[in-house]
Image (cartoon, grey):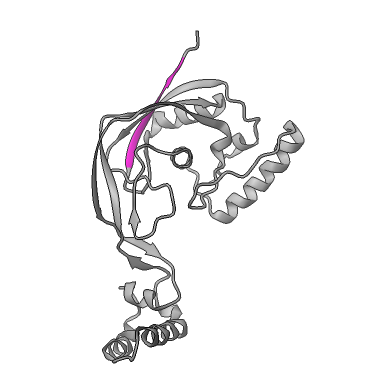
Amino acid sequence: MLTDISILFEEPKLEQDVILVIKPLAPLSMVNNLPGSYYKTERMPTKPMLCGLFENLLGWHFSEEDRIKIFKEMQKHHKKQYNKNLEKEESESGYQLLLGYYFEVTPQVLIPVLKHYEDLWTQHMIGADTRHLDGSVHNSWNLENELSILRKQKFSSKRERDNIFSDYFKKNQDKFPLYYRDVPKREFIIAQGDYRLKLNMNSNLLAKLKEQVKENDIGYLGTSEGWVTISFQEVKNV
């Protein structure tokens, strides 16, 4: 099935003011920066999060490599057709925005009453050292005897243990899952009401999103469990 990305090659004029209404259906965790061992949520969605929400509604699921290729074509086209130099936009976590040129978030935002809590959150990570052995629970059964012996060994230092485990993982990497699990603390919010954000938006993008919302108004914010329903209310300028 072909994905229509023609909007990205149109001139990014922001002709329409609109109120984006976001109704959370589940607890949200909207992490903006690069966290350490604690994932702190934002109180409201950032522009990159809204880009992710809109892309999700449009059915866009692009890899990092595809985003780079698409953006390069966008840069060439916008320079040639509209004499505009597109600067790369990305979130602090490295997510590259594609739709970000077609809307802006204004300071006019209504945030609902929020309740905060924190919970443990399963994170899938890629490693090539002892962390993978400690965090993988679905490695090949052929390794169980050797791993059991390794774990019972006494080592003179943590460094020695890490080196031996890392060497073992590298030699048997094809028998482990691609990801290992980590369980950091993550902050969540329960929103008692709706978010209302005023956006300046490209009219064609707005039309495409409103058409999608007629069939499916469900998307997500922050995590794949942060389900929300959305709607648009046009602002008539007098």
How many marks can you see?
Answer: 0
Asked if residue 204 is among those painted magenta in the image, a careful observer would answer no
State the predominant SS element of the stretch in magenta.
strand
- For the point 33% across and 65% down, the residue is 182
- For the point 36% across and 49% down, the residue is 224
Q: Position of residue 129 (x, y in %)?
A: 43, 77
Asked if residue 232 is among those painted magenta in the image, a careful observer would answer yes
Q: Position of residue 109 (x, y in %)?
A: 39, 27
Q: Is residue 210 above or below residue 161?
A: above
Q: Position of residue 212 (x, y in %)?
A: 44, 32
Residue that extends furthest to the front in the rendered view of this protein: 157
> Quarter of the image holding residue 15?
top right
Is residue 111 shown left or right of residue 10?
left
Residue that extends furthest to the top in the rendered view of this protein: 238
Q: Is residue 195 above or below residue 115?
A: above
Out of 119 and 212, give the one closest to the viewer.
119
- For the point 63% across and 46% down, the residue is 71
Highlighted magenta segment, given as a residue range: 227-235
> Quarter of the image holding residue 193?
top left
- For the point 69% across and 42% down, the residue is 75
Q: Position of residue 12 (x, y in %)?
A: 62, 30
Is residue 182 shown left or right of residue 128?
left
